[in-house]
Amino acid sequence: MLHFLFCFGVWTLVVAVIVKQAIRGIIEGINHVKKMHQIPCANCVYFTGDYRLKCPVNPIEAMSENAITCRDFEIKSDYTINNLSTTAHGKSA
């Protein structure tokens, strides 16, 4: 009986550690995805879309976490927010 309780306790501990690590990994993944969605490069006028040179102004920082605070970011004139297109002057069409 003591052997059974010991094995059950070890098994429960191992499962608890695995579940804790899985939950931690999921939370870190969600936080990472949220941070990546803050990168504004795809909506910038300087973004080329070419994998060789994504941005001629800041080529090293383009599409990275450093681009979140890019000083050179300018929104594209044809960028749409909630189905409202914006013009170069900031007025909606």
Image: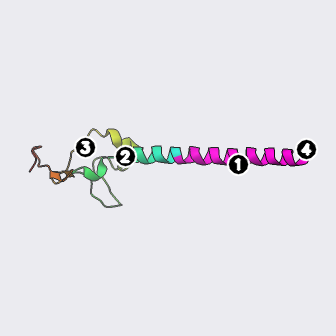
User: At which x and y percent is residue 85?
Assistant: 14, 52
Residue identified by numbered label 2: 61
Q: Residues within 10 Å of mark 3 (few under 14, many from 20)?
A: some
Amino acid type indicated by mark 1: Val
Identify the residue at image location x=60%, y=48%: 22
* First in sequence: mark 4 vs mark 2: 4
Q: Is 11 displayed left or right of 36 in the figure?
A: right
Q: Which mark is residue 73?
A: 3
Identify the residue at image location x=29%, y=53%: 42
Q: CA distance from mark 3 to mark 4?
A: 67 Å
User: At which x and y percent is residue 74?
Assistant: 21, 45
Q: Secondary structure at mark 3?
A: loop
Residue range highlighted in magenta: 1-26
Q: CA distance from mark 1 to mark 2?
A: 41 Å
Q: Nearer the viewer, mark 3 or mark 2?
A: 3
Secondary structure mostly seen in magenta is helix
Q: CA distance from mark 4 to mark 1?
A: 20 Å
Residue identified by numbered label 1: 15
Amino acid type indicated by mark 3: Phe
Q: CA distance from mark 1 to mark 3?
A: 47 Å
Residue identified by numbered label 4: 2
Q: For this rendering, which residue is in front, 83 or 45?
A: 83
User: At which x and y percent is residue 82?
Assistant: 21, 50
Q: Residues within 10 Å of mark 1 (few under 14, many from 20)?
A: few
Q: Nearer the viewer, mark 4 or mark 2?
A: 4
C-beta proximity under 8 Å, tags 4 and 1: no
Amino acid type indicated by mark 4: Leu
Q: For this rendering, which residue is in front, 88 or 22?
A: 22
